[in-house]
Image: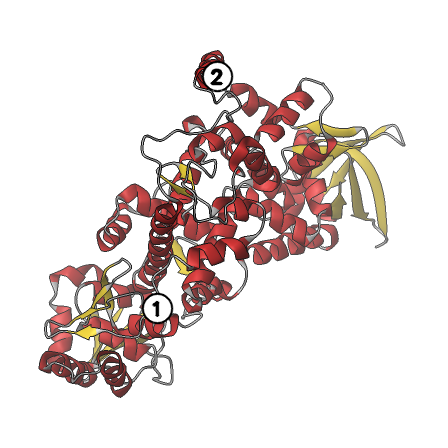
Amino acid sequence: MSDLLQLANQLRQRTDEQLVSLLHRRTVVGLSKDFFDLAQSLLTPKSVNQALSRLSASEVAALRALVAGQPADSEVLGALADIALVVESPGGHTTLEAVVAQLAAIPQKQNAAASMNAAKARNATAMATGIANAPLLLAEPAAPLETEVVLGLAAIAAFETQLALTELVLDVEQHLIKQIGKSGFGVGDVKRLSSHLGKNNATVRGYYLLAQQLQLVQLIGERWYLTPAAQSFLDSSVMDRWLLIATQWVRSLGPTGAKEMLDLGLGAGDAGSTNQSATDQGAVTLDSALERVFPLADESLGNELSLLKQQAQDIGFSVSGMATPLLVPCLKGDFARAKDLLEAHLPSAQHSLIVQADLSLIAPGPLDTATESTVRKFAQIEQVSVACSYRLSALSVSHGLECGLSIDEIRNTLLDLSQKPLPQPVEYLLTEAQNRFGRLTISKGLGLDRAILRSTDGIHLTEVLNDARLRPFAFQPVTASSIATRFEPDVLYFALRDNGYVPVRVDESGAVISPRAKHSWSAESLLVEQDPLADLIAKLRAADQKVGSQPDDQDLVRQIQLAVKNKAQLLVTLLSRDGSEVEFTVIPTALANGRLRGLDKKADIERTLPLEKILKVTF
């Protein structure tokens, strides 16, 4: 049996929980219609390479031993089978040709001997200076940082990262983000968020990848949507957000990665002590530890190592490449201890804003979660840091009204936070936003007119019609107060906002649809309410059951062609002339002209079976 069939059959036998675990750790290329598609996707060079780059040193050693026909740790091989890099067989575990080919294509590191010589030289130097027993990765910075300073820097990085992810979620909510290029995110979207956060493009792309790993965003068709997890993330406290990110990073190390990190000496010293310097705690070069634990995670396999290093800095696990006291407790699974350490070094939450006449809002410190959630509905953040600044605009206030707030609620929130009368320009903006709200409405159209734009102000509608930036929408007048376009309502909504207009979306009854609604008009977006992996697995199960009961012609042809290609034995259920069902076990040899030819070994004859009479096939 071929690797594809063997892997597909084993995937079919896994529980839903096991499949979810597999899909969390493996990259699936394209949409999988059935278990054969899924197996084929897992065996692509891209998917195999990414899986290899995430293997720990012990997993790499076990895989190489299995390929060489040498004894290997059965427990580690079981972990490799869990991620479909090897398959279980009656005699133990066997390799997959696609994995063997990709493993052989990875050159052994040519500088291994040089690294060994360098290690010996370091040890010799250590002996000469009286520290012969120092661990290999022990770092000797020129100016050791005190633990309090390290934790302070880690706290700032952790706070800014969770805030950056919050901004990413809100950016996806307020803009139409399409899949573009290999990374899945366009340069324009990355630059917009990069400028907003004050970070470089590479860092922002890392945030997008982290959001994918946390399943805050989901790709449906060619557009990125928010998931229910994104709303939960927004509603969570700063520390809960950090715990979610930290847990994901440790999980990405794999079942053996965290243990191997600790075995390298990362656990030296008392991580809970704050009276020692970073060096006294056995400060370890985290970058070097990652390189040793993940020997295949180099540039040629997709920047996995660089991503882990960058995320470690963003989370607060490392400062200048050195492990912080937050790392060891998390590697050991003691996230509560790490949370206490971090929380003690975060600035306390504030409940105050300085409201200025230029429509800016200054937060002297981080706002508490409930207050921040409310403010972010009607104000756009300008400076992302521990002390943030926000700005009011017609678009931001309209967004707050769309989210269900009233102008009085917005005004009272600002009064409560500032404890002073609002500046006159702010009052003018709130009054104007209330008067203009709902002047432009977008509703679902019929037939080719997918969206209808209505306005109570004919002049305003004419302005939209004559706007050169909106010519691609090819608006067609419907009535004196409405125009239509063939584009989807969501596309029109975001385009108008990006060009300075203040539209709102309404349903069939005329009620305003919140930007944070779980779904809009698109039938595809209804999937966002479900776990994307659970939905994929449900489809795989349904396709498998369909093929085994009443498949359509395409299913039959697909299964038979697969069997012919792999010379796999098939159990064919055929409808006989008298209307009864008969079964033949054959090894198919050809499929042409609507007929299946195959060898029936039991009867020792070649059978020709009409495709139109075949009810189902089973491997």
Instruction: Give the residue type that dot 1 points to.
Output: Ala
Q: Residue 288, image x and y in percent? A: 45, 29
Q: Nearer the viewer, residue 272 or 494?
A: 272
- Left or right of 316: which side holds 293? right
Q: Is residue 297 above or below residue 209?
A: above
The single residue placed furthest to the bottom in the displayed view is 408
Total number of numbered labels? 2
Q: Between marks 1 and 2, how big is the CA–CA gap?
A: 49 Å
- Callout 2 secondary element: helix
Q: Residue 232, image x and y in percent? A: 46, 66
The answer to whether residue 502 is visible is no
Q: Residue 445, image x and y in percent? A: 34, 74
- Callout 1 secondary element: loop
First-in-chain label (1 vs 2): 2
- Left or right of 204: which side holds 126? right
- In the rendered image, which residue does mark 2 sit on? 127
Q: Is residue 559 above or below residue 478?
A: above
Instruction: Give the residue type that dot 2 points to.
Output: Met
The answer to whether residue 287 is visible is yes
Q: Residue 436, image x and y in percent? A: 18, 82
- In the rendered image, which residue does mark 1 sit on? 349
Say which quarter of the image contains residue 298.
top left
Characterize the local packing of mark 2: few (<14), some (14-19) or many (20 or more) Cα atoms within 10 angstroms.
Answer: few
